[in-house]
Image (cartoon, helix red, strand yellow):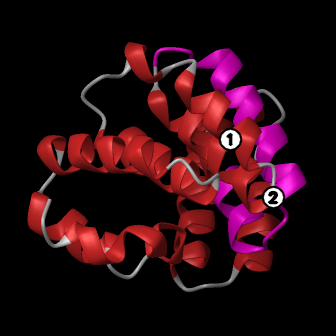
Amino acid sequence: MPELKDMDNVHLEAAEGWLGLGLPLDALEELEKISHARRALPDFLHVRYEICAASKQWESAAEVAKELCRISPDAPSGFIQLAYSLHELRRTTEALNALLTVADRFPDVPTISYNLACYHCQLGDLPAASKCLKRALKLGGAANIKKMALGDLDLKPLWESISNL
């Protein structure tokens, strides 16, 4: 019989598999089988966040992301997820501020610059949005980011100028 720790890994991997198949409720069932001690760890919380996001449960997603920020302050993912959740809750000013407070800690993460561009754009600050998008293009694969930006409704006010970046 596998050890409890090993079974937690099996359930976590199964949850990720269900998510990959677009079945967040089945993924949640798998997470519920994981020991309580494991539920406080980042790998569990990341999957929990993805389940909330896939289910569009943005309040819960924000709470999970806050916990990730608390226990993993040196990882950018929790902050990105928190900001995204806030934006989905139509709390874009809070989303912007959440990322602005950590942007200097993660200067080489293109997702932060890209998301800052989206939030600035949605708040009507097109010069700041353009500056952040230029940074994201510089940090990440410019062609891929440009293509993504041209399909991102959050950046629609910049679509005409994106081809010149």
Closer to the camera in the image, 54 or 105: 105
Q: Is residue 68 above or below residue 139?
A: above
User: What residue span does the magenta drawing correspond to?
Assistant: 49-74
Left or right of 40? Residue 147 is left
Closer to the camera in the image, 60 or 133: 133
Residue 82 within the magenta-colored segment of the rendering: no
Residue 132, position as x, y percentages in the image: 34, 42
Q: Considering the numbered disc 2 on the image, is that residue within a helix, a strand or a loop?
A: loop
Residues packed near mark 2 inside 10 Å, few (<14), some (14 to 19) or many (20 plus):
few
Amino acid type shown at disc 1: Ala
Residue drawn where x is 38% and y is 68% of the image = 158
Q: Is residue 2 visible?
A: no
Q: Is residue 63 above or below residue 148?
A: above
Q: Considering the numbered disc 1 on the image, is that residue within a helix, a strand or a loop?
A: helix
Check disc 1 and report the residue beneath it: 95
Residue 159, position as x, y percentages in the image: 34, 76
